[in-house]
Image (cartoon, helix red, strand yellow):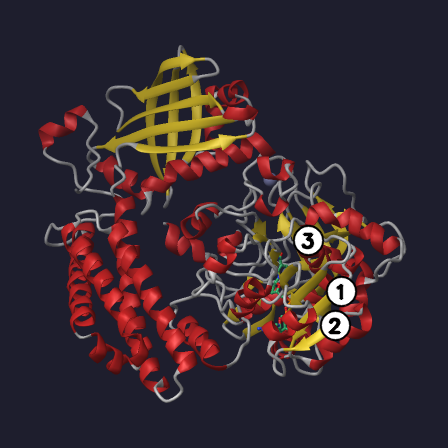
Amino acid sequence: MKANCWQSKKKMSVETVPDPKILNSQDAIVKITTTAICGSDLHLYNGFVPSMQQGDIVGHEFMGEVVETGKSVSKLKVGDRVVVPFPISCGKCFFCEKQMYSLCENSNPNAWLAEKMWGHSPAGIFGYSHLLGGFAGGQAEYARVPFADVGPLKIENGFTDEQVLFLSDIYPTGYMAAEACDIKPGDTIAVWGCGPVGQFAIKSAFLLGAERVIAIDKIPERLRMARELSGAITLNFDEVDVLESLKELTGGRGPDACIDAVGMEAYGHGPVYAYDRAKQAMMLETDRPIALREAILACRNGGVVSIAGVYGGFVDKMPFGSLMNRSLTIKTGQTHVHRYMKPLLDRVERGEIDPSFVITHRLKLEDAPHGYDMFNNKENECIKVVLKP
Amino acid sequence: MATQWETHPGARTMGPLPVVGRSTLTANGKTNRQANTATTDLLINSLGWFSIGLGLAEVLAPRKVAKITGARKHTGLIRAFGVREIISGVGILTNRRAAGWVWSRVGGDMLDLASLGAAMTRSGRNRSKTLLSAAAVAGVTVLDIRAAQQVSAQKEEHDALDRLEASVIVNQSPEECYTFWRHLENLPRFMSYLESVRDMGNGRSHWVALAPGNLKLEWDAEITEDKPGQTIAWRSLQGSEVTTTGSVEFQKAAGNRGTIVRVQMSFAARGQALARLAKLAGKHPEQMVYKDLRRFKQVMETGEVITTEGQPAGRTSGATWLDSIAR
Ligand SMILES: NC(=O)c1ccc[n+]([C@@H]2O[C@H](COP(=O)([O-])OP(=O)(O)OC[C@H]3O[C@@H](n4cnc5c(N)ncnc54)[C@H](O)[C@@H]3O)[C@@H](O)[C@H]2O)c1
Ligand SMILES: [Zn+2]
Ligand SMILES: [Zn+2]
């Protein structure tokens, strides 16, 4: 089959590789009909995620048709149409029982390695480094899906792939980030980053009852999307001082909750940005927490800072005093996608949201490397790329 | 410090067994681990003196330091940093368990960098100087981090090879865990190096292990303790090429959260079997039992051990990145 493989920093290539096989009795093989490139994949692309190996098949947002099932699979049948959640979860452990699926204790074969880096290991993730299990990903024609009875969501109505694909990641991710804000009527929520995750966080914040959402980015078409498709107030951080503007918009108090939908590769200005870039380049910090610092400082006293953006290692100059002295709450995590798939599909069915709104580019799987390049450079007004095998 | 696989009673008469595991024998008879320790010590010592030197300069000549680093207005701060440097330098040099102290240096560097960062945002003219000194401090930080890492790694290496211990919490009752384990023929399902265990009755069993390269090791064992739902212990019989003991304890976890499983094992071998045992244990024998226990948990909770072996990748060599660091 054809699969998009990580070669080295800033280099992906579509290779012909063997078809995946059933390796565990609870596996299914899915013939992929649509897959996508995620902002998280850019962190792999730009070389910020350790433990990638040349040839690793990437991709964790995919859906398709079940073509084979292992002997212990009982809920899925050949021919079923499914969306696959990006974390791999056993459904039986302490965390799965608590519906904290991205913390599954049994799905990362390399857990001991993650424990060395992070103290404890989270769940395995498709196509997302050996630290997170080394599973072959879904930017391919076929994928092997472990614990097939636990993860994949059957799609039995007439929705198009594009309408349901993002149940695999970014729609639940934006939703979980907004849910973490514990939104009350009248609340103002600020969202850093208007990429696909930010867009879903903005929409979800409104769905969950926010009165105002303030969206922050510097890319005009992304700000426009937030404004025109979701009704957010937008701030361009290239043009205004974000902290000042947020104060002004909230009478000095600050937003009730702040969502970081940017992650470890944030942009910024001036010496602080230079400082973070330099330290990152010298491996003195692994992540540039520019948006996160700002989100903490901006948040109102006693508010919530909800972090959807991915961080990998160590960050510097965290305003921890601000966090502590002002009773802020931090909520974060890889999304517990399984928990949200069904209820969020229901919202699609009820017509509350059509997740395909973020798609700007449709490419063939063969063109994945071009898709990465374009999405990474935010060229051609690219916001979300879907790939067709 | 070199740990030896010397639990076999007969081994003593033959003098110490060669060291296996992570610390391999080098030509001059010194182990790699000893060599590593020496480098780490050197690194730590120089860091200690660097700290004191920098600290003294900061305390005695804060203005000069401020001028050199381009942070003119912050002499008070710099003096405070100096005191901290001296404390951590003395700590590093005098404390035999240096890990904590070296990490305090890392913390100190972050403080320096933070305030340099603050200086950077304010003083426009001195920016290039500040950047320079940021780079210098950053350089020291690299050393700090390396030292701290090495010290942490070293700590781990103290794990005795003849007393491999691990524990894990399993979402099943002690009885279920016990029953599965007591059926010794189940062990190869999660002890990756075992090819088979055959129950020969009367509490005796025959074990076959496979080291990389298809090297076989065999031994007979007997159960020495067996408390249903609580503990099992076993040991190899006299005359086996491998001398091994093991025990597992199943303790009901607090709050009805399943079972805490604790395992302890040791291995020793003589003569020809030793090389095969060393292969079997790999570079991280201390990890071997722990990884097996994680697999035990997977089998108990999900019914099987999850694997990625045999999945496709766009590379010609079958080896994964993990193989390169794990074996
Ligand atoms: N928690 C999860 O489970 C999960 C799931 C999916 C994605 N993510 C993460 O969410 C983040 C966003 O993903 P995406 O797909 O939207 O990626 P993206 O790269 O398209 O979006 C990031 C956006 O942040 C903007 N940005 C950069 N610096 C900023 C700053 N200082 N202030 C405000 N905006 C800034 C960029 O211009 C860009 O539009 C990534 O870190 C990704 O890894 C997390
Ligand atoms: Zn993603
Ligand atoms: Zn689980």
Amino acid tagged 1: Arg
Q: In the image, is residue A367 above or below residue A331?
A: below
Q: Position of residue A9 (x, y in %)?
A: 50, 73
Chain letter of disc 3 in the image: A
Check chain identity for marks 3 and 1: say if they share one: yes
Q: Which residue is disc 1 drawn over?
A: A212
Q: Is residue B74 left or right of residue B227?
A: left
Quadrant position of residue B267: top left
N-terminal-most mark, 1 or 2? 1
Picture residue at 53% right of the left edge, 46% below the top: A108
Q: Which residue is disc 3 drawn over?
A: A176
Foreground residue among A81 and B258:
B258
Check chain identity for marks 2 and 3: say if they share one: yes
Separation of residues labelled 3 and 1 (CA atoms): 18 Å
Amino acid tagged 3: Met
Q: Position of residue B283 (x, y in %)?
A: 31, 47
Amino acid tagged 2: Ile
N-terminal-most mark, 2 or 3? 3
Query: Disc 1, disc 2: CB below 8 Å?
Result: yes
Q: Can residue B192 be seen in this view?
A: no
Q: From the image, state whether disc 3 or disc 1 is nearer to you.
A: 1
Q: Which element is circle 1 on?
A: strand
Q: Residues within 10 Å of mark 3 (few under 14, many from 20)?
A: many
Query: Disc 3, disc 1: CB below 8 Å?
Result: no
Q: Which residue is disc 2 drawn over?
A: A233
Quarter containing the N terminus of chain B: top left
Q: Residues within 10 Å of mark 2 (few under 14, many from 20)?
A: some
Q: How crowded is mark 1: few (under 14 residues within 10 Å), some or many (20 or more)?
A: some
Q: Where is residue B145 in the image (x, y as percent from the top left)?
A: 31, 61
Q: In the current view of this chain or complex, which residue is farthest to the bottom?
A: B125
Separation of residues labelled 2 and 3 (CA atoms): 21 Å
Q: In the current view of this chain or complex, which residue is farthest to the top?
A: B202
